[in-house]
Protein backbone atom coordinates (compact mmCIF):
# COMPACT_ATOMS: atom_id res chain seq x y z
CA UNK A 1 0.00 0.00 0.00
CA UNK A 2 1.06 3.55 -0.51
CA UNK A 3 -0.33 6.74 0.89
CA UNK A 4 -2.07 9.00 -1.57
CA UNK A 5 -2.32 12.75 -1.77
CA UNK A 6 -5.84 12.59 -3.14
CA UNK A 7 -4.94 12.77 -6.81
CA UNK A 8 -7.12 9.84 -7.83
CA UNK A 9 -9.67 10.93 -10.41
CA UNK A 10 -13.24 10.97 -9.13
CA UNK A 11 -15.63 8.41 -10.60
CA UNK A 12 -18.59 9.84 -12.47
CA UNK A 13 -20.83 7.09 -11.08
CA UNK A 14 -23.62 8.46 -8.94
CA UNK A 15 -24.15 7.18 -5.40
CA UNK A 16 -27.91 6.60 -5.42
CA UNK A 17 -28.17 5.35 -1.85
CA UNK A 18 -31.36 6.10 0.08
CA UNK A 19 -31.80 5.41 3.77
CA UNK A 20 -34.00 2.42 4.67
CA UNK A 21 -36.20 2.55 7.77
CA UNK A 22 -38.77 -0.25 7.58
CA UNK A 23 -40.03 0.11 11.15
CA UNK A 24 -40.13 3.90 11.39
CA UNK A 25 -37.19 4.01 13.79
CA UNK A 26 -36.67 7.61 12.70
CA UNK A 27 -39.60 8.46 14.99
CA UNK A 28 -37.36 7.49 17.92
CA UNK A 29 -34.58 9.84 16.84
CA UNK A 30 -34.11 13.52 17.69
CA UNK A 31 -33.68 16.29 15.15
CA UNK A 32 -29.98 16.38 16.06
CA UNK A 33 -29.65 12.68 15.19
CA UNK A 34 -31.34 13.13 11.83
CA UNK A 35 -29.29 16.21 11.00
CA UNK A 36 -26.09 14.33 11.84
CA UNK A 37 -27.16 11.49 9.55
CA UNK A 38 -28.00 13.81 6.66
CA UNK A 39 -24.76 15.76 7.01
CA UNK A 40 -22.52 12.70 7.12
CA UNK A 41 -24.46 10.96 4.35
CA UNK A 42 -24.05 14.02 2.10
CA UNK A 43 -20.33 14.16 2.87
CA UNK A 44 -19.89 10.46 2.11
CA UNK A 45 -21.74 10.84 -1.19
CA UNK A 46 -19.57 13.78 -2.16
CA UNK A 47 -16.14 12.82 -0.82
CA UNK A 48 -16.04 9.05 -0.31
CA UNK A 49 -18.24 7.30 -2.88
CA UNK A 50 -16.58 8.85 -5.96
CA UNK A 51 -13.09 7.70 -4.95
CA UNK A 52 -13.41 4.71 -2.63
CA UNK A 53 -13.49 1.92 -5.21
CA UNK A 54 -10.28 3.19 -6.76
CA UNK A 55 -8.46 3.69 -3.47
CA UNK A 56 -9.56 0.28 -2.28
CA UNK A 57 -8.56 -1.32 -5.56
CA UNK A 58 -5.11 0.25 -5.37
CA UNK A 59 -4.82 -0.45 -1.63
CA UNK A 60 -4.17 3.22 -0.93
CA UNK A 61 -5.32 5.15 2.11
CA UNK A 62 -7.16 8.39 1.27
CA UNK A 63 -5.34 10.28 4.01
CA UNK A 64 -6.63 13.59 2.63
CA UNK A 65 -10.02 12.59 4.12
CA UNK A 66 -8.74 12.99 7.69
CA UNK A 67 -9.33 16.75 7.48
CA UNK A 68 -12.85 16.32 6.12
CA UNK A 69 -13.67 13.78 8.82
CA UNK A 70 -12.59 16.33 11.39
CA UNK A 71 -14.70 19.03 9.76
CA UNK A 72 -17.89 16.95 9.88
CA UNK A 73 -17.27 16.19 13.56
CA UNK A 74 -16.48 12.49 13.15
CA UNK A 75 -13.59 12.59 15.63
CA UNK A 76 -14.91 12.25 19.17
CA UNK A 77 -18.58 13.10 18.55
CA UNK A 78 -19.45 12.43 22.20
CA UNK A 79 -16.33 14.04 23.72
CA UNK A 80 -17.26 17.38 25.39
CA UNK A 81 -16.93 20.47 23.21
CA UNK A 82 -14.51 22.15 25.64
CA UNK A 83 -11.91 19.62 24.46
CA UNK A 84 -12.81 19.94 20.78
CA UNK A 85 -15.30 17.03 20.64
CA UNK A 86 -18.84 17.17 19.32
CA UNK A 87 -20.65 17.12 22.67
CA UNK A 88 -23.33 14.87 21.17
CA UNK A 89 -24.99 11.81 22.65
CA UNK A 90 -24.15 8.16 22.03
CA UNK A 91 -26.89 7.66 19.43
CA UNK A 92 -25.52 10.54 17.35
CA UNK A 93 -22.07 8.95 17.62
CA UNK A 94 -23.53 5.63 16.43
CA UNK A 95 -25.35 7.23 13.51
CA UNK A 96 -22.17 8.98 12.37
CA UNK A 97 -20.31 5.65 12.40
CA UNK A 98 -23.17 4.02 10.48
CA UNK A 99 -23.07 6.62 7.73
CA UNK A 100 -19.28 6.48 7.45
CA UNK A 101 -19.28 2.70 7.16
CA UNK A 102 -22.05 2.95 4.58
CA UNK A 103 -19.22 4.54 2.58
CA UNK A 104 -16.49 2.11 3.62
CA UNK A 105 -15.46 0.23 6.78
CA UNK A 106 -11.96 1.66 6.43
CA UNK A 107 -13.26 5.21 6.54
CA UNK A 108 -15.24 4.38 9.68
CA UNK A 109 -12.06 2.84 11.10
CA UNK A 110 -10.21 6.13 10.57
CA UNK A 111 -12.84 7.81 12.76
CA UNK A 112 -13.29 4.99 15.31
CA UNK A 113 -9.61 4.81 16.11
CA UNK A 114 -9.15 8.56 16.38
CA UNK A 115 -12.27 9.14 18.48
CA UNK A 116 -12.84 6.00 20.53
CA UNK A 117 -9.37 4.56 20.89
CA UNK A 118 -7.18 7.67 21.08
CA UNK A 119 -9.30 10.66 22.16
CA UNK A 120 -11.45 8.63 24.55
CA UNK A 121 -8.55 7.20 26.67
CA UNK A 122 -6.89 10.61 26.83
CA UNK A 123 -10.22 12.16 27.85
CA UNK A 124 -11.04 9.42 30.36
CA UNK A 125 -7.62 8.61 31.82
CA UNK A 126 -5.45 11.62 30.92
CA UNK A 127 -4.29 14.57 33.03
CA UNK A 128 -5.92 17.95 32.46
CA UNK A 129 -2.71 19.08 30.75
CA UNK A 130 -2.76 16.08 28.38
CA UNK A 131 -6.44 16.66 27.58
CA UNK A 132 -5.91 20.36 26.82
CA UNK A 133 -2.87 19.66 24.65
CA UNK A 134 -3.85 16.57 22.65
CA UNK A 135 -7.64 16.51 22.35
CA UNK A 136 -8.21 19.68 20.29
CA UNK A 137 -5.38 18.67 17.95
CA UNK A 138 -6.89 15.21 17.50
CA UNK A 139 -10.41 16.58 17.03
CA UNK A 140 -9.23 18.94 14.29
CA UNK A 141 -7.16 16.28 12.52
CA UNK A 142 -3.93 18.19 13.15
CA UNK A 143 -2.71 15.06 14.95
CA UNK A 144 -3.55 11.53 13.81
CA UNK A 145 -3.53 8.87 16.50
CA UNK A 146 -3.41 5.10 16.74
CA UNK A 147 -4.04 2.52 19.47
CA UNK A 148 -1.57 -0.22 20.30
CA UNK A 149 -2.95 -3.18 22.22
CA UNK A 150 -2.59 -6.27 20.00
CA UNK A 151 0.82 -7.96 19.86
CA UNK A 152 2.15 -10.58 17.45
CA UNK A 153 1.57 -13.34 20.04
CA UNK A 154 -1.32 -11.76 21.97
CA UNK A 155 -4.42 -10.91 19.97
CA UNK A 156 -7.58 -12.24 21.59
CA UNK A 157 -5.70 -12.49 24.87
CA UNK A 158 -4.18 -9.05 25.47
CA UNK A 159 -3.64 -9.87 29.15
CA UNK A 160 -0.58 -11.87 28.05
CA UNK A 161 1.15 -8.79 26.58
CA UNK A 162 4.92 -8.61 26.83
CA UNK A 163 5.51 -5.02 25.73
CA UNK A 164 7.00 -3.49 28.84
CA UNK A 165 8.46 -0.44 30.54
CA UNK A 166 11.34 -0.09 32.96
CA UNK A 167 11.47 2.89 35.30
CA UNK A 168 14.37 5.26 34.60
CA UNK A 169 13.94 8.43 36.66
CA UNK A 170 11.76 10.94 34.80
CA UNK A 171 11.21 8.48 31.95
CA UNK A 172 10.22 4.94 31.15
CA UNK A 173 12.23 2.78 28.77
CA UNK A 174 9.75 1.04 26.49
CA UNK A 175 10.43 -2.23 24.65
CA UNK A 176 8.20 -4.54 22.63
CA UNK A 177 6.02 -4.64 19.52
CA UNK A 178 2.40 -4.15 18.58
CA UNK A 179 0.81 -5.70 15.50
CA UNK A 180 -2.16 -4.88 13.24
CA UNK A 181 -2.38 -1.26 14.24
CA UNK A 182 -4.80 0.86 12.20
CA UNK A 183 -3.22 4.15 11.04
CA UNK A 184 0.13 3.47 12.74
CA UNK A 185 2.32 4.37 9.72
CA UNK A 186 0.67 7.80 9.43
CA UNK A 187 0.11 8.50 13.11
CA UNK A 188 1.62 11.39 15.06
CA UNK A 189 0.90 9.73 18.40
CA UNK A 190 0.18 6.21 19.61
CA UNK A 191 -1.72 5.28 22.77
CA UNK A 192 0.29 2.22 23.82
CA UNK A 193 -0.52 -0.31 26.51
CA UNK A 194 2.48 -1.85 28.26
CA UNK A 195 3.35 -3.74 31.40
CA UNK A 196 5.39 -2.07 34.17
CA UNK A 197 7.87 -3.73 36.51
CA UNK A 198 5.08 -4.53 38.98
CA UNK A 199 3.26 -6.39 36.19
CA UNK A 200 0.52 -3.74 35.90
CA UNK A 201 -0.75 -2.58 32.51
CA UNK A 202 -0.32 1.16 31.97
CA UNK A 203 -1.13 3.51 29.08
CA UNK A 204 1.45 5.77 27.43
CA UNK A 205 1.27 8.43 24.74
CA UNK A 206 4.20 7.66 22.44
CA UNK A 207 5.07 10.34 19.91
CA UNK A 208 6.35 9.95 16.38
CA UNK A 209 10.04 10.79 16.24
CA UNK A 210 10.91 9.34 19.66
CA UNK A 211 14.23 7.54 19.24
CA UNK A 212 13.83 3.78 18.77
CA UNK A 213 10.15 4.00 17.74
CA UNK A 214 9.14 2.84 14.25
CA UNK A 215 5.79 2.01 12.64
CA UNK A 216 6.29 -0.16 9.53
CA UNK A 217 3.33 -0.80 7.29
CA UNK A 218 1.70 -4.24 6.92
CA UNK A 219 1.17 -5.11 3.25
CA UNK A 220 -0.89 -7.69 1.41
CA UNK A 221 -4.37 -7.21 2.89
CA UNK A 222 -7.36 -8.37 0.84
CA UNK A 223 -9.66 -6.59 3.29
CA UNK A 224 -9.94 -3.01 4.55
CA UNK A 225 -7.67 -2.01 1.68
CA UNK A 226 -8.40 1.71 1.91
CA UNK A 227 -7.28 1.70 5.54
CA UNK A 228 -3.60 1.74 6.44
CA UNK A 229 -2.39 -0.84 8.96
CA UNK A 230 1.03 -1.29 10.52
CA UNK A 231 3.13 -2.36 13.45
CA UNK A 232 4.54 -0.39 16.36
CA UNK A 233 8.09 -1.36 17.25
CA UNK A 234 9.78 -0.06 20.40
CA UNK A 235 13.50 -0.51 20.95
CA UNK A 236 14.61 1.19 24.15
CA UNK A 237 12.29 4.11 23.54
CA UNK A 238 12.61 6.75 26.24
CA UNK A 239 9.09 7.95 27.06
CA UNK A 240 8.80 10.83 29.57
CA UNK A 241 6.65 9.93 32.57
CA UNK A 242 4.48 12.96 31.82
CA UNK A 243 3.27 10.92 28.81
CA UNK A 244 1.73 8.25 31.01
CA UNK A 245 -2.07 8.32 31.30
CA UNK A 246 -2.19 8.92 35.07
CA UNK A 247 -5.71 7.79 35.88
CA UNK A 248 -5.69 4.13 34.87
CA UNK A 249 -3.90 0.90 35.67
CA UNK A 250 -4.87 -2.58 34.54
CA UNK A 251 -6.43 -4.24 31.49
CA UNK A 252 -9.70 -2.52 32.30
CA UNK A 253 -8.26 0.65 30.70
CA UNK A 254 -7.86 -0.67 27.13
CA UNK A 255 -10.98 -2.82 27.49
CA UNK A 256 -13.03 0.27 28.34
CA UNK A 257 -11.75 1.87 25.12
CA UNK A 258 -12.73 -1.28 23.22
CA UNK A 259 -16.25 -1.05 24.61
CA UNK A 260 -16.53 2.46 23.23
CA UNK A 261 -15.23 1.42 19.80
CA UNK A 262 -17.24 -1.82 19.65
CA UNK A 263 -20.38 0.20 20.28
CA UNK A 264 -19.53 2.36 17.24
CA UNK A 265 -18.84 -0.75 15.15
CA UNK A 266 -22.24 -2.22 16.06
CA UNK A 267 -23.79 0.85 14.42
CA UNK A 268 -21.17 1.07 11.68
CA UNK A 269 -21.73 -2.45 10.40
CA UNK A 270 -25.37 -1.56 9.79
CA UNK A 271 -24.15 1.06 7.33
CA UNK A 272 -22.34 -1.56 5.27
CA UNK A 273 -25.42 -3.82 5.41
CA UNK A 274 -27.72 -0.96 4.38
CA UNK A 275 -25.53 -0.11 1.41
CA UNK A 276 -25.47 -3.74 0.22
CA UNK A 277 -29.24 -4.06 0.65
CA UNK A 278 -29.85 -0.75 -1.12
CA UNK A 279 -27.69 -1.76 -4.06
CA UNK A 280 -29.22 -5.25 -4.29
CA UNK A 281 -32.79 -3.93 -4.09
CA UNK A 282 -32.18 -1.42 -6.89
CA UNK A 283 -30.33 -3.96 -9.03
CA UNK A 284 -33.12 -6.51 -8.56
CA UNK A 285 -35.62 -4.07 -10.07
CA UNK A 286 -33.38 -3.04 -12.97
CA UNK A 287 -31.83 -6.34 -14.02
CA UNK A 288 -34.06 -8.33 -16.37
CA UNK A 289 -33.70 -12.08 -16.96
CA UNK A 290 -36.26 -14.48 -18.43
CA UNK A 291 -38.27 -11.44 -19.51
CA UNK A 292 -38.76 -9.84 -16.11
CA UNK A 293 -36.86 -8.09 -13.31
CA UNK A 294 -34.98 -10.60 -11.15
CA UNK A 295 -36.67 -8.97 -8.13
CA UNK A 296 -39.87 -10.63 -9.33
CA UNK A 297 -38.49 -14.12 -8.65
CA UNK A 298 -39.38 -15.64 -5.30
CA UNK A 299 -35.80 -16.63 -4.51
CA UNK A 300 -34.60 -13.04 -4.95
CA UNK A 301 -37.48 -11.75 -2.83
CA UNK A 302 -36.56 -14.23 -0.10
CA UNK A 303 -33.02 -12.84 -0.01
CA UNK A 304 -34.21 -9.22 0.04
CA UNK A 305 -36.96 -9.84 2.61
CA UNK A 306 -34.51 -11.59 4.93
CA UNK A 307 -32.02 -8.74 4.49
CA UNK A 308 -34.47 -6.03 5.49
CA UNK A 309 -35.71 -8.14 8.40
CA UNK A 310 -32.18 -8.61 9.77
CA UNK A 311 -31.34 -4.93 9.22
CA UNK A 312 -34.50 -3.89 11.07
CA UNK A 313 -33.67 -6.19 14.01
CA UNK A 314 -30.15 -4.74 14.12
CA UNK A 315 -31.51 -1.19 13.99
CA UNK A 316 -33.75 -1.89 16.98
CA UNK A 317 -30.92 -3.56 18.90
CA UNK A 318 -28.63 -0.60 18.22
CA UNK A 319 -31.22 2.00 19.10
CA UNK A 320 -31.90 0.30 22.43
CA UNK A 321 -28.18 -0.06 23.08
CA UNK A 322 -27.83 3.65 22.31
CA UNK A 323 -30.52 4.62 24.81
CA UNK A 324 -28.82 2.46 27.46
CA UNK A 325 -25.45 4.04 26.60
CA UNK A 326 -26.96 7.52 26.93
CA UNK A 327 -28.06 6.57 30.46
CA UNK A 328 -24.60 5.12 31.20
CA UNK A 329 -26.17 1.67 31.55
CA UNK A 330 -24.92 -0.26 28.49
CA UNK A 331 -22.85 -3.17 29.80
CA UNK A 332 -19.74 -4.47 27.99
CA UNK A 333 -21.58 -7.77 27.41
CA UNK A 334 -24.54 -5.98 25.81
CA UNK A 335 -22.12 -4.13 23.54
CA UNK A 336 -20.44 -7.44 22.64
CA UNK A 337 -23.80 -8.92 21.64
CA UNK A 338 -24.58 -6.00 19.34
CA UNK A 339 -21.09 -5.94 17.77
CA UNK A 340 -21.19 -9.66 17.11
CA UNK A 341 -24.75 -9.77 15.81
CA UNK A 342 -24.57 -6.71 13.61
CA UNK A 343 -21.23 -7.44 11.98
CA UNK A 344 -22.20 -11.02 11.21
CA UNK A 345 -25.57 -9.82 9.92
CA UNK A 346 -23.80 -7.36 7.61
CA UNK A 347 -21.42 -10.01 6.32
CA UNK A 348 -24.26 -12.43 5.53
CA UNK A 349 -26.15 -9.63 3.75
CA UNK A 350 -23.06 -8.63 1.77
CA UNK A 351 -22.68 -12.22 0.54
CA UNK A 352 -26.37 -12.46 -0.42
CA UNK A 353 -26.26 -9.05 -2.11
CA UNK A 354 -23.22 -10.21 -4.07
CA UNK A 355 -25.27 -13.13 -5.36
CA UNK A 356 -28.15 -10.88 -6.43
CA UNK A 357 -25.69 -8.80 -8.49
CA UNK A 358 -24.55 -11.94 -10.33
CA UNK A 359 -21.22 -11.49 -12.12
CA UNK A 360 -21.40 -7.72 -11.75
CA UNK A 361 -21.29 -8.29 -8.01
CA UNK A 362 -17.60 -9.16 -8.09
CA UNK A 363 -16.65 -5.90 -9.80
CA UNK A 364 -16.07 -2.41 -8.43
CA UNK A 365 -19.09 -1.17 -10.36
CA UNK A 366 -21.04 -2.01 -7.20
CA UNK A 367 -19.99 -1.66 -3.55
CA UNK A 368 -20.95 -5.13 -2.31
CA UNK A 369 -17.74 -7.11 -2.81
CA UNK A 370 -15.70 -4.34 -1.19
CA UNK A 371 -18.04 -4.29 1.81
CA UNK A 372 -17.95 -8.08 1.98
CA UNK A 373 -14.16 -8.18 2.06
CA UNK A 374 -13.99 -5.32 4.56
CA UNK A 375 -16.43 -7.04 6.88
CA UNK A 376 -14.10 -10.04 7.21
CA UNK A 377 -11.78 -7.71 9.12
CA UNK A 378 -14.61 -6.12 11.09
CA UNK A 379 -15.68 -9.62 12.17
CA UNK A 380 -12.18 -10.14 13.59
CA UNK A 381 -10.97 -6.85 15.00
CA UNK A 382 -12.27 -5.33 18.22
CA UNK A 383 -12.76 -8.91 19.45
CA UNK A 384 -13.47 -11.81 17.12
CA UNK A 385 -16.94 -13.21 16.48
CA UNK A 386 -16.21 -16.16 18.76
CA UNK A 387 -14.67 -14.07 21.54
CA UNK A 388 -17.88 -12.01 21.70
CA UNK A 389 -19.93 -15.20 21.83
CA UNK A 390 -17.85 -16.33 24.80
CA UNK A 391 -18.36 -12.95 26.48
CA UNK A 392 -22.14 -13.46 26.17
CA UNK A 393 -21.75 -17.04 27.38
CA UNK A 394 -19.80 -15.91 30.42
CA UNK A 395 -22.35 -13.19 31.16
CA UNK A 396 -25.37 -15.49 31.12
CA UNK A 397 -23.82 -18.51 32.85
CA UNK A 398 -21.40 -16.79 35.18
CA UNK A 399 -18.79 -19.32 34.02
CA UNK A 400 -15.56 -18.15 32.37
CA UNK A 401 -14.65 -20.16 29.23
CA UNK A 402 -11.39 -18.22 28.71
CA UNK A 403 -9.43 -19.53 31.65
P1 LIG B 1 -11.10 -9.74 32.46
O1 LIG B 1 -10.53 -10.28 33.72
O2 LIG B 1 -12.41 -10.27 31.95
O3 LIG B 1 -11.26 -8.14 32.58
C1 LIG B 1 -10.26 -7.32 33.16
C2 LIG B 1 -10.98 -6.10 33.72
O4 LIG B 1 -11.59 -5.36 32.64
C3 LIG B 1 -13.04 -5.32 32.82
N1 LIG B 1 -13.60 -5.51 31.48
C4 LIG B 1 -14.13 -4.52 30.74
N2 LIG B 1 -14.32 -3.21 31.00
C5 LIG B 1 -14.88 -2.46 30.04
N3 LIG B 1 -15.22 -2.96 28.83
C6 LIG B 1 -15.02 -4.25 28.52
N4 LIG B 1 -15.35 -4.73 27.32
C7 LIG B 1 -14.45 -5.09 29.50
N5 LIG B 1 -14.11 -6.41 29.54
C8 LIG B 1 -13.61 -6.64 30.75
C9 LIG B 1 -13.34 -6.44 33.77
O5 LIG B 1 -14.54 -6.18 34.48
C10 LIG B 1 -12.12 -6.44 34.68
O6 LIG B 1 -12.25 -5.34 35.55
P2 LIG B 1 -11.62 -5.36 37.04
O7 LIG B 1 -12.14 -4.13 37.69
O8 LIG B 1 -12.11 -6.64 37.67
O9 LIG B 1 -10.13 -5.35 36.83
O10 LIG B 1 -9.98 -9.84 31.35
P3 LIG B 1 -9.47 -11.08 30.51
O11 LIG B 1 -8.01 -10.98 30.36
O12 LIG B 1 -10.03 -12.37 31.07
O13 LIG B 1 -10.11 -10.74 29.07
C11 LIG B 1 -11.26 -11.22 28.64
C12 LIG B 1 -11.47 -10.97 27.12
C13 LIG B 1 -11.04 -12.18 26.32
C14 LIG B 1 -12.97 -10.75 26.97
C15 LIG B 1 -10.70 -9.72 26.61
O14 LIG B 1 -9.34 -9.92 26.68
C16 LIG B 1 -11.05 -9.36 25.18
O15 LIG B 1 -12.02 -8.64 24.96
N6 LIG B 1 -10.26 -9.82 24.16
C17 LIG B 1 -10.41 -9.39 22.78
C18 LIG B 1 -9.27 -8.46 22.42
C19 LIG B 1 -9.70 -7.37 21.51
O16 LIG B 1 -10.88 -7.07 21.31
N7 LIG B 1 -8.74 -6.67 20.94
C20 LIG B 1 -9.02 -5.52 20.13
C21 LIG B 1 -7.78 -4.73 19.83
S1 LIG B 1 -8.07 -3.09 19.27
C22 LIG B 1 -8.70 -3.28 17.74
O17 LIG B 1 -8.98 -4.30 17.25
C23 LIG B 1 -8.91 -2.01 17.03
S2 LIG B 1 -9.58 -2.14 15.45
C24 LIG B 1 -9.66 -0.50 15.13
C25 LIG B 1 -10.36 -0.12 13.92
O18 LIG B 1 -9.70 0.00 12.87
O19 LIG B 1 -11.59 0.17 13.98
P1 LIG C 1 -6.13 -14.81 17.52
O1 LIG C 1 -6.36 -14.26 18.86
O2 LIG C 1 -4.87 -15.58 17.29
O3 LIG C 1 -7.38 -15.72 17.13
C1 LIG C 1 -7.35 -16.67 16.06
C2 LIG C 1 -8.64 -17.48 16.11
O4 LIG C 1 -8.69 -18.19 17.37
C3 LIG C 1 -9.90 -16.62 16.08
O5 LIG C 1 -10.88 -17.25 15.32
C4 LIG C 1 -10.34 -16.55 17.53
O6 LIG C 1 -11.74 -16.34 17.67
C5 LIG C 1 -9.92 -17.93 18.02
N1 LIG C 1 -9.73 -17.93 19.47
C6 LIG C 1 -8.79 -17.29 20.21
N2 LIG C 1 -8.95 -17.53 21.50
C7 LIG C 1 -10.04 -18.34 21.62
C8 LIG C 1 -10.75 -18.91 22.72
N3 LIG C 1 -10.38 -18.69 24.00
N4 LIG C 1 -11.80 -19.71 22.46
C9 LIG C 1 -12.23 -19.91 21.17
N5 LIG C 1 -11.60 -19.38 20.09
C10 LIG C 1 -10.53 -18.59 20.32
N6 LIG C 1 -5.43 -4.14 17.25
C11 LIG C 1 -5.07 -3.03 17.93
O7 LIG C 1 -4.62 -3.11 19.07
N7 LIG C 1 -5.20 -1.78 17.37
C12 LIG C 1 -5.67 -1.61 16.11
O8 LIG C 1 -5.80 -0.47 15.64
C13 LIG C 1 -6.05 -2.76 15.35
N8 LIG C 1 -6.45 -2.64 14.06
C14 LIG C 1 -6.63 -3.76 13.30
C15 LIG C 1 -6.82 -3.64 11.91
C16 LIG C 1 -6.92 -4.77 11.12
C17 LIG C 1 -7.07 -4.64 9.64
C18 LIG C 1 -6.89 -6.06 11.72
C19 LIG C 1 -7.04 -7.30 10.89
C20 LIG C 1 -6.71 -6.19 13.08
C21 LIG C 1 -6.55 -5.05 13.88
N9 LIG C 1 -6.24 -5.16 15.25
C22 LIG C 1 -5.91 -4.04 15.98
C23 LIG C 1 -6.03 -6.47 15.85
C24 LIG C 1 -7.32 -7.25 16.15
O9 LIG C 1 -7.97 -6.74 17.26
C25 LIG C 1 -6.93 -8.72 16.33
O10 LIG C 1 -6.62 -9.22 15.04
C26 LIG C 1 -8.03 -9.53 16.99
O11 LIG C 1 -8.23 -9.14 18.33
C27 LIG C 1 -7.73 -11.04 16.94
O12 LIG C 1 -6.42 -11.31 17.34
P2 LIG C 1 -5.50 -12.28 16.41
O13 LIG C 1 -5.55 -11.75 15.02
O14 LIG C 1 -4.18 -12.38 17.07
O15 LIG C 1 -6.24 -13.67 16.40
Image (spheres, grey):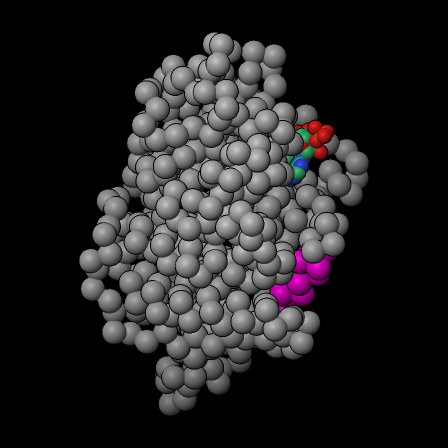
Whether residue 262 is situated above or below residue 390 in the rendered picture: below
Image location (x, y in percent) of residue 198: 61, 12
Q: Give the position of the N terminus as an image quadrant.
A: top left
Q: Would you identify the image quadrant in which residue 390 lies?
A: top right
- Count of marks placed on residues: 0
Image location (x, y in percent) of residue 357: 38, 71
Which residue is most to the bottom? 291
Whether residue 258 is situated above or below residue 153 in the rendered picture: below
Query: Which secondary structure is most common in the magenta stretch?
Result: helix
Over which residues does the magenta segment extend? 312-324
Tell me if I can see residue 67 in this picture.
yes
Image location (x, y in percent) of residue 372: 43, 57
Whether residue 282 is situated above or below residue 188 in the rendered picture: below
- Viewer-nearest residue: 402 or 186: 186
Q: Residue at x 47, y 69 (%)?
A: 39
Q: Give the position of the C terminus as an image quadrant.
A: top right
Image location (x, y in percent) of residue 261: 56, 46
Residue 31 belongs to the span the image colors magenta: no
Q: Residue at x 58, y 56 (%)?
A: 87
Q: Residue at x 64, y 71 (%)?
A: 30
Amino acid sequence: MSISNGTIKKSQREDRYQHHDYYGIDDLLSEEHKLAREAVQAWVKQEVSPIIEEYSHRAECPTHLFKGLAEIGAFGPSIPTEYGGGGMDEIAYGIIMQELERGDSGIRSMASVQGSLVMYPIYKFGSEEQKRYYLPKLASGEFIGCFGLTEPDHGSNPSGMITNVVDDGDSYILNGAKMWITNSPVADIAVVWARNEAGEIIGLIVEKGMKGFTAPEIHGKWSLRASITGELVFQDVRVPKKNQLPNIKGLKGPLMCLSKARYGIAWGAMGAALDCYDSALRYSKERVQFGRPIGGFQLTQKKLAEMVTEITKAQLLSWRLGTLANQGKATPAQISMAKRNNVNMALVIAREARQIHGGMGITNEYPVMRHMLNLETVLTYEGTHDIHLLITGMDITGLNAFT
